[in-house]
Image (cartoon, rainbow, N blue to C red):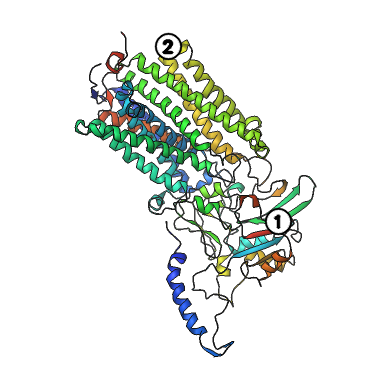
């Protein structure tokens, strides 16, 4: 089975960098005071590691019905609204994130929420992919390797969230953030191009950023493994749920109020 | 019983060339459809992000399942030692290879990136049943070719039983793999059932034998070679048993689902809904594809070969209908993403109503071309190599023949 380049090559590179970091960290002036310490965020060239798990808490109580700021931001960020998909019918067009309004059948309680790839710990799309094009990074982000996706669409059959789209026509105006190609499958990348940046340039995924800008603050993004991150603190404080929790997939995206 | 004499078909008559021409034209039309789909992208098909597998998959999976079943006749001769089936072994094996080739052709040409076939052959995720199937399908060709070789070359005949056993087990594993494509889909209420794998095996027996019977009867009629009534009678009775077995599995599948409240939605959708799937299930799969052929096979109608041919054709149509209901119907029923909630609005067709699918001409032609390609391979194969005995008259092949 093939592994994505970053993961397979990353081991030796990581060891090398780890050794370098250990040496650097060893330059101590006095106990507790280091001349150089290892920064928390990784340099952009370093392979991702399982020290982090990216995830999100979506508070449906704060998510405004009728607001589509997250969807619009995603479409702009990843070039989904470039006007490329002119021939595809609405049911054929790609959607990485969508707004869904729900009503509880018993109580009539209504919620509005954004739904995208849930970045499962045990993703069915990765299990079924024959070539390994569907893969999960060490930090929990589920992606499609566009170079080895053969367009069989078995992952779309397997995904419980209907989070994936198939590209039904030739595209010419892709965003540099997200290479996309006819005949392959795609889905939310959790804006890896943003979260992989160095600390100084690091930004939240476009959807979460837009939700904050809009003032709703319904989407908290962060490292689920860092107890001090905003998302971990919020998850600890409030009860939350995963969609289709019964499937035991442990998604990285959690919801409040459903 | 005399020694079986295998002979190539002559292949010089105008009928032969008309057959080649018709089959070739259908294959070309299918390839044209494929070119159109791949050139423009899948937007020209009826498929979308809800119905991701369409008509090509219906035909491809049907052919792959039937391929495994077509080998059944050879297995009965080799593995179960039934003398009358042995002379049919070569044709049965050829048909199995041809059907698999036709099915795989359709499957591969419907990929989003058929040009990346080499990727599928070189990158394997061994947790994927699809990846295993790529190995099982390719292996099937090799196993059956060796089996045919052992049958054809006198000096290798001593290994033919071992090769036959191996092919038999390979075929069972192969169809288990095909059924598991659907059985392993945990999130879809229409699939996710262990019964899929054994049901697909029984379906393969039925579809494969129906195609074999048709090919056998037409082949011997067109080449004017004798074909005994005992042979036909045994095969049609066996087909009856297989049709009944498929019905039993379909019944067990639906009964189990009907017992579980969580599956009532999908059961109502298939069995008593207002979509085409309910009609296709009851009229095409059950009435025309199962009950009608059973009536033909077990009544006096079966004295006529024409009626046995019609029964076989009905089984094939019923089989395609069953595949349509499983593959398209299973996707048309919406995913239950939010149990207990109703979807008020969504831009991505989540929700309470089922998804619709209208196959385009191009994808239907591609599917049909798989059948034509399989028949083309059988016709040409029988012309260049000795697959068909010059006589299947009862006195020549049936050791129990009284007459």
For mark 2, name the chain: B
Q: Position of residue B249 (x, y in %)?
A: 53, 30
Camera-side residue: A181 or A226?
Answer: A226
Q: Is residue A124 above or below residue B306?
A: below
Residue furthest top in the image:
B403
Label 1 belongs to which residue? Answer: A113
Location of residue B37 with respect to B7 vertically, above or below: below
Could you tell me if residue B208 is visible in this image?
Answer: yes
Q: Which residue is mark 2?
A: B303
Say which chain tag 1 marks. Answer: A
Residue located 32% across and 9% down the image: B402
Q: Secondary structure at mark 1?
A: strand
Q: Quadrant of the C terminus of chain B?
A: top left
Residue positioned most to the left: B155
Residue B305, given in percent of the width and then of the height, sits at 40, 15
Instruction: Determine whether label 2 and label 1 are within 8 Å by CB.
Output: no
Q: Is residue B387 left or right of residue B35?
A: left
For the residues marked 2 and 1, what is the alpha-carbon distance in whole angstroms? 65 Å
The image quarter in which residue A140 lies: bottom right
Q: Is residue B38 left or right of residue B141?
A: right
- In the picture, residue A52 is in which quadrant? bottom right
* Label 2: element kind: helix
Q: Which mark is residue A205?
A: none
- Near-viewer residue (B173 or A42): B173
Quadrant assignment for the N terminus of chain B = top left
A252 and A79: which is toward the camera: A252
Determine the residue positioned at 54% across, 62% down: A178
């Amino acid at each position: 089975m093939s592994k994505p380049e970053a993961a397979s090559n990353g081991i030796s590179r990581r060891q090398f960098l780890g050794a370098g970091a250990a040496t650097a960290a060893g330059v101590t002036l006095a106990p507790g005071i280091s001349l150089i310490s290892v920064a928390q965020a990784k340099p952009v060239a370093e392979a991702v590691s399982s020290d982090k798990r990216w995830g999100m808490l979506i508070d449906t109580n704060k998510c405004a019905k009728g607001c589509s700021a997250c969807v619009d931001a995603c479409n702009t960020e990843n070039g989904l609204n470039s006007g490329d998909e002119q021939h595809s019918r609405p049911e054929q067009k790609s959607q990485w994130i969508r707004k869904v309004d729900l009503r509880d059948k018993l109580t009539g309680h209504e919620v509005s929420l954004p739904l995208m790839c849930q970045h499962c710990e045990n993703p069915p799309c990765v299990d079924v992919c024959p070539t390994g094009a569907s893969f999960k990074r060490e930090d929990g982000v589920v992606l499609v390797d566009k170079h080895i996706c053969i367009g069989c669409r078995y992952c779309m059959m397997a995904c419980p969230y209907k989070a994936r789209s198939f590209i039904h026509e030739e595209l010419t105006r892709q965003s540099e953030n997200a290479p996309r190609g006819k005949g392959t499958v795609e889905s939310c990348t959790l804006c890896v191009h943003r979260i992989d940046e160095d600390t100084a340039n690091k930004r939240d995924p476009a959807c979460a950023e837009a939700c904050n800008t809009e003032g709703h603050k319904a989407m908290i993004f962060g490292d689920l493994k860092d107890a001090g991150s905003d998302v971990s603190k919020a998850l600890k404080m409030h009860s939350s749920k995963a969609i289709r929790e019964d499937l035991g997939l442990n998604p990285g995206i959690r919801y409040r109020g459903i | 019983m005399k020694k079986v004499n295998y002979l190539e078909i002559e292949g010089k008559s105008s009928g032969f060339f008309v057959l080649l021409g018709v089959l070739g034209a259908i294959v070309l039309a299918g390839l044209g459809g494929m070119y159109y789909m791949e050139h423009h992208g899948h937007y020209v098909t009826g498929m979308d992000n809800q119905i991701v597998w369409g008509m090509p998959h219906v035909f491809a999976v049907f052919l792959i399942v039937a391929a495994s079943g077509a080998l059944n006749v050879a297995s009965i001769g080799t593995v179960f030692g039934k003398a009358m089936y042995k002379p049919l072994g070569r044709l049965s094996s050829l048909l199995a290879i041809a059907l698999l080739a036709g099915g795989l052709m359709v499957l591969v040409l419907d990929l989003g990136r058929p040009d990346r076939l080499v990727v599928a052959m070189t990158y394997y995720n061994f947790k994927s049943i699809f990846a295993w199937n790529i190995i099982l399908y390719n292996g099937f060709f090799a196993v059956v070719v060796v089996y045919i070789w052992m049958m054809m070359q006198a000096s290798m005949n001593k290994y033919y039983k071992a090769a036959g056993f191996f092919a038999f087990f390979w075929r069972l594993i192969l169809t288990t793999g095909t059924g598991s494509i659907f059985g392993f889909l945990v999130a879809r209420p229409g699939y996710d059932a262990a019964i899929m794998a054994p049901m697909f095996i029984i379906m393969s027996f039925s579809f494969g034998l129906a195609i074999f019977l048709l090919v056998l009867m037409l082949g011997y009629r067109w080449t004017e070679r004798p074909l005994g009534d005992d042979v036909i009678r045994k095969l049609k009775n066996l087909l009856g048993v297989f049709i009944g077995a498929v019905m039993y599995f379909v019944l067990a599948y639906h009964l189990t689902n009907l017992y579980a409240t969580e599956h009532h939605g999908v059961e109502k959708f298939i069995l008593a809904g207002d979509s085409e799937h309910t009609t296709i299930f009851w009229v095409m799969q059950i009435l025309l594809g199962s009950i009608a052929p059973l009536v033909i096979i077990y009544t006096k109608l079966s004295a006529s070969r024409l009626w046995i041919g019609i029964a076989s054709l009905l089984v094939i149509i019923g089989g395609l209908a069953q595949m349509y209901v499983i593959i398209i119907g299973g996707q048309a029923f919406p995913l239950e993403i939010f149990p207990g909630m109703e979807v008020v609005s969504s831009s991505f067709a989540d929700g309470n109503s089922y998804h619709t699918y209208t196959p385009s001409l191009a994808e239907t032609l591609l599917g049909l071309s798989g059948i034509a390609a399989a028949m083309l391979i059988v016709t040409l194969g029988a012309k260049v190599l000795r697959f068909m005995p010059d006589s299947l008259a009862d006195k020549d092949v049936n050791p129990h023949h009284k007459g």
